[in-house]
Structure formats: structure tokens, C-alpha cells
Amino acid sequence: MDLEKTKTFLLEILKMNAEPKSLDWLALQKEKIGEDTSYMKFYLAFGMASRYFKKNLMDLSETKIQKAKTLVEGFSPESWDQLQTARSYLLLHFGIADASAWVDAINKLFETADMHEQQSLYAALPLMPFREEMVERAVEGLRTNIASVFDAIALDNPYPSQYMEERAWNQMVLKAVFMQRPLYRIQGADKRANPTLAKILVDFAHERWAAGRKVMPELWRFVGPYLDIQNFGDIEKVIHSSDPLEKNAALLACHQSGFVPANSLLKQFPKVQREIQQGELTWEKIGREFENLSRPQ
């Protein structure tokens, strides 16, 4: 990551969204942080930013959205608000060269941070200078039951797929399923799919069914590549569901599979198979539809 280019980009998009007086304050704090040999100016500015920046989502052009991804792979500032962006800009000016001292200072900030401050910090993980050293903190953050904080790590964030070990990744996905979070917003979902996760999720589905409850359709995305004789009956069950969204998810899982019976089953639904091949039926489409159906009216 080019730190200077990322700082410049954050300031550019803030100028397009925030008020001039807020930007003046930000510029002053940047200078104070740079001159301060202790952590205090940074801590104070990070907390005070809420007085100057709103929690309105950033309004970004497609050009800016794409530019963000050239700076940091998977960086999605369109899911950030103004306050998160300002805090991330301040964070990037907190220049401690020693990794241990930097991590210690940021961990202290995490420990005293309120909900929105934690959200900002976790979302900024892929921008941090010592990213590998923050894995333990990220895993700790996933234990939260606060959806907004969990989402800051798990959704629209390239950090988990790039840095978390398989066990932590699997636990994150399982918790996202349990919390009914929009799985299509988990970056690296297909790349990090693994047989252990597939088994965990199939077992979870069995528990839900035994309790008379439904399973979110997106779950089958993580099972599709690992369909076999042992779990194929579960996919057949979902395909014969009366819920068209569940049925389409199961057929999309069959499309992901190299298991011959799954491929043969998909061929029995030529219309859906054609939609999949033409890119009309995707996991994002299924996820968005499920999200809309689950949203309180």
C-alpha cells in the first residue's frame, strides 16, 4: 500500500462530502499529530472527530470506487461514512515507525473506544501500516454481538480473507450465518472456501432443520465446491423446497461443484442453468434478495 497516495485519496473524497469547517479542523489535527511525540494528540483528535463529521455514508462516483481498489485490494470506502473516513485519515498520520509501539498504542485505543470508534478502527484494518500484527485484535473483535462492529470486520473488508488463518475465517463465516448477516458482502468468499467450513455449515443446517427453522440461502455458497455423496442429499432437499430463493441457491451450489450427480441435477433445470451461465443468477443477487426479504417492513 502506498501510504501517501492513500492519505491523499481519503482527503479527496472527504473534500467531496464534508463541510469546509470540518476539513479545516482535520488539517489542524493532522499537523498536531505530526508534531506530537506522545499519543495524546492523536487520541484526542480521534475522539473529537465526531463533533465535526457526520455519520452519513460517503457519496462516491464509480471512478473513485474503482480508484480505491487500485490503492488497496478490496478497499470499499463506499460502505464508510464521513466520520469513519476522517478517523482513518487521522490514523494514517499517526506515524510511529516501530511496529510494537504502534500496535500497543492502537490496542489502547481499541480498549477505550466506543462502538462507532471500534467500527472505524476495524474497517480501517486493511489500511493500517502493520496489518499482520493486528490479526489477534481482529479475531478478538469478531467475538462481539454488536452487528455494526462485527460487520466492520466481516463485510466489505479484504482483511479477513487476506490475513486470518482458516480456523478464524471459518468461525467468522459461521457467526455471520448465525447472525444472518449478508454473506455476499464477505470478500474472498470463494477463494477461502474449504471442506472444514462446508462440513461445519452442513451441520449447522441440520441443527436448524431439526429445530423447525430455515437456513439462509447463501450458506450453500460455501458448500457447493465440496458436494459429495455424504451431503448431496441436503442439496436435493433444498432444491425441492417451496422457497424459490433456496432452490436457486442450491442449484447455484451445484453449478460450483465438480460432483457429477450435482451437475446432472442442475441439468434438470435448464432455465436456471441458463440464468447461471449468463450471469443473471449470482450469489450477490440471491444475497440481496434475501436481505430485502429479511428487512423489517
Image: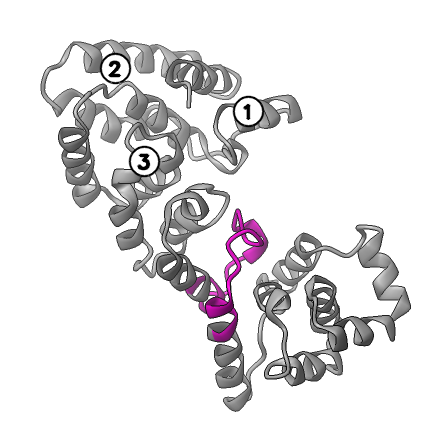
Looking at the image, is 42 positioned above or below residue 279?
above
Q: Secondary structure at mark 3?
A: loop
Q: Nearer the viewer, mark 2 or mark 1?
A: 1
- Name the foreground residue: 268 vs 25: 268
Callout 3 environment at 10 Å: few (<14), some (14 to 19), or many (20+)? Answer: some
Mark identifier at residue 198: none
Type of amino acid under label 1? Thr
User: Would you say 38 lies left or right of 243 here?
Assistant: left
Magenta stretch in the rendered image: 175-199
Residue for badge 2: 29
User: Would you say 187 lies left or right of 106 here?
Assistant: right
**Would you say residue 234 sits in the magenta stretch?**
no
Q: Is residue 60 visible?
A: no
Q: Residue at x 35, y 43 (%)?
A: 119
Q: Quadrant of the C terminus?
A: bottom right
User: Would you say 39 lies left or right of 31 here?
Assistant: left
Looking at the image, is 258 positioned above or below residue 206?
above
Callout 2 environment at 10 Å: few (<14), some (14 to 19), or many (20+)? Answer: many
Type of amino acid under label 3? Arg
Distance of label 1 from label 3 (alpha carbons): 18 Å
Mark identifier at residue 70: 1
Residue at the far right: name it. 270
Image location (x, y in percent) of residue 197: 47, 67
Q: Work out whether mark 1 precedes mark 3 in sequence or the reverse, and give the earlier one.
A: 1
Q: Nearer the viewer, mark 3 or mark 2?
A: 3
Distance of label 2 from label 1 (alpha carbons): 27 Å
Distance of label 3 from label 2 (alpha carbons): 24 Å
Q: Residue at x 30, y 22 (%)?
A: 90
Mark identifier at residue 131: 3
Q: Work out whether mark 2 precedes mark 1 in sequence or the reverse, and give the earlier one.
A: 2
Image location (x, y in percent) of residue 167: 36, 61
Q: Secondary structure at mark 1?
A: helix
